[in-house]
Image (cartoon, grey):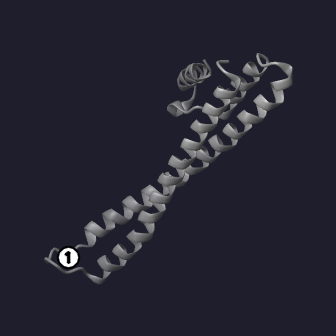
Amino acid sequence: MLIDSIRKLAASERKEAPGGEVGMKNLGAFVSNQRTRVKDEHNNTFAFSWSKVFRRFRFLEIIKPRHDAASAAFAENSNAFLNALSGESGTLSPEAEAIQADSYELSSRVHLEIESYYLFAKIVLDDVARAEYYFGPV
């Protein structure tokens, strides 16, 4: 089955790639290998179907470092806020208020990246499912 082949590819690449990430190089090799098993009249359709997967998988690779940067900035802001608390109940210093104001923007950026990743991951999975449905077990 196509999904099983992708899982095997991902497992083999985790052994080779730093961080265990699946890369475009091995995904491209997978499609090139499987493309030869499709009838000639469907060869380009098969490749085109997988080109959408590649493009959106690349979006995930772009979103991940943006999320990491936004998350680090938010964590730094949260630590600064905790350090700026005056200790008096119910009051914030002007410094803590300024830091808290920044936290809304930083929190929104983190959530934007999380939700972007989630949406594109779902789209990638849908595209893979469509390719498998159209071409059957490869």
**On the rendered image, what quadrant is the C terminus found in?**
top right
Position of residue 127 relative to residue 40, above or below, is below
Q: Amino acid at mark 1?
A: Ser
Which residue is denoted by mark 1 in the rendering? 86
Quarter of the figure with residue 29 = top right
Which residue is painted at 81% across and 25% down in the image? 42
Position of residue 106 relative to residue 127, above or below, is below
Q: Viewed as shown, does residue 51 lie left or right of 107?
A: right
Quarter of the figure with residue 122 = top right
Label 1 element class: loop
Q: Viewed as shown, does residue 90 lie left or right of 56?
A: left
Position of residue 91 relative to residue 45, above or below, is below
Which residue is painted at 57% across and 50% down in the image? 63
Residue extending farthest to the bottom is: 94
**On the rendered image, what quadrant is the N terminus found in?**
top right
Quarter of the figure with residue 58 = top right
Residue extending farthest to the left is: 89
Which residue is painted at 56% across and 19% down in the image? 4
**Toward the viewer: 105 or 74?**
105
Residue extending farthest to the right is: 41
**Toward the viewer: 95 or 2?**
2
Image position, residue 56 (x, y; %): 65, 44
Image position, residue 77 (x, y; %): 37, 66
Image position, residue 135 (x, y; %): 70, 24
- Neighbours of disc 1 within 10 Å: few (<14), some (14-19), many (20+): some
Image position, residue 61 (x, y; %): 60, 44
Q: How many marks?
A: 1
